[in-house]
Image (cartoon, rainbow, N blue to C red):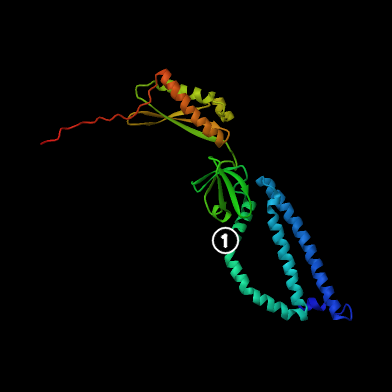
């Protein structure tokens, strides 16, 4: 710090004027450094906001925090570079140390959320409008991502406010991060007396008629004649033959509607075509109490 002060000590014959020039020079350098940092941050934030599909103004806090840090650093340099202010500066910083420690301890959770929010921006495990499941508990659409918390709108239109430090440490299932298509498993059990081929054909026809059905076959599968809805016999149960159909849809919300509708339409067709869906039967024997 002394060498930095020496650069400005002989500019004029007045020490006070030299100190003012030193202070002005430090603030000019800090301002130039801040502008360069803000240019880099703006490029990074705009790119990340585009990827996350969020408003870049949500990161205004980060820019303001950078302003505070740079100008605070400049002020520290000025206090430590001017001999007349050095003792005052050391006293102020020493007395503020205890307060800073208390404030830092109290703000630990807040800073943890901010750092986790920055990591979410950098690594992008999910974006706004993605459908995610957090730790197999919270399930819904990402509505907002900011530096403190993430807002998830569940399927009952309730908002879940999850701190970034929490969501950053959980297992996240993202339904949109690479490919939003969903393969539904439609499972039906039919009686052993029912026509197996007819049941398979009904499942395929009802699935392909649905408005959200997606033909996800590859060119090779089309050439080999693989059906658009693949139905397999997966198990001989105690009272039923269990069938599983693979039905594709474009995204999770359409997948849910498709699955519910198909269960209903297949049940109606089974009833019409005489395909029985078995259910357990119980025999209850009453015994007379002995005297």
Q: Quadrant of residue 284?
A: top left
Image spot of residue 288 (x, y percent) = 15, 32
Q: Look at the picture and state if 114 lies above or below 257.
A: below
Q: Look at the picture and state if 132 lies above or below 181.
A: below
Residue at the (54%, 23%) spot, across then down: 209
Mark 1, secondary structure of its residue? helix
Residue at the (52%, 52%) spot, across then down: 170
Image spot of residue 228 (x, y percent) = 53, 26
Image spot of residue 61 (x, y percent) = 68, 57
Residue 225 in view of the camera: no
Residue carrying label 1: 109
Q: Look at the picture and state if 49 lies above or below 254.
A: below
Image spot of residue 68 (x, y percent) = 72, 64
Residue situated in front as seen by the camera: 36 or 152: 152
Q: Residue furthest right?
A: 13
Residue at the (65%, 76%) spot, across then down: 95
């Amino acid at each position: 710090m002394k060498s930095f002060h020496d650069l400005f000590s002989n500019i004029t014959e007045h020490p006070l004027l030299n100190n003012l020039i030193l202070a002005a020079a430090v603030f000019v350098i800090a301002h130039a450094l801040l502008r360069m940092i803000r240019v880099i941050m703006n490029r990074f934030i705009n790119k990340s906001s585009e990827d996350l599909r969020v408003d870049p103004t949500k990161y205004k806090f980060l820019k303001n925090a950078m302003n505070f840090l740079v100008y605070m650093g400049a002020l520290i340099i000025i206090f430590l570079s001017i001999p007349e202010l050095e003792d005052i500066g050391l006293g102020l910083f020493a007395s503020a140390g205890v307060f800073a420690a208390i404030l830092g301890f109290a703000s630990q959770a807040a800073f943890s959320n901010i750092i986790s929010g920055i990591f979410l921006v950098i690594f992008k495990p999910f974006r706004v409008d993605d459908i995610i499941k957090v730790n197999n508990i919270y399930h819904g659409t990402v509505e907002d991502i900011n530096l403190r918390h993430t807002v998830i709108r569940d399927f009952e239109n309730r908002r879940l406010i999850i701190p970034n430090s929490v969501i950053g440490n959980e297992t996240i299932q993202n339904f949109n991060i690479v490919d939003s298509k969903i393969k539904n498993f439609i499972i039906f059990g039919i009686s052993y007396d029912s026509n197996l081929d007819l049941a398979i054909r009904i499942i395929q026809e009802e699935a392909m008629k649905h408005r959200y059905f997606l033909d996800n076959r590859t060119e090779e599968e089309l050439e080999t004649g693989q059906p658009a809805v693949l139905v397999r016999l997966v198990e001989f149960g105690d009272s039923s033959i269990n069938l599983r159909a693979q039905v594709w849809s474009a995204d999770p919300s359409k997948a849910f509607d498709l699955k519910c509708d198909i269960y209903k339409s297949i049940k109606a067709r089974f009833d019409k075509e005489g395909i029985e869906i078995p259910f357990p039967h119980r025999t209850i024997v009453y015994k007379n109490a002995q005297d």
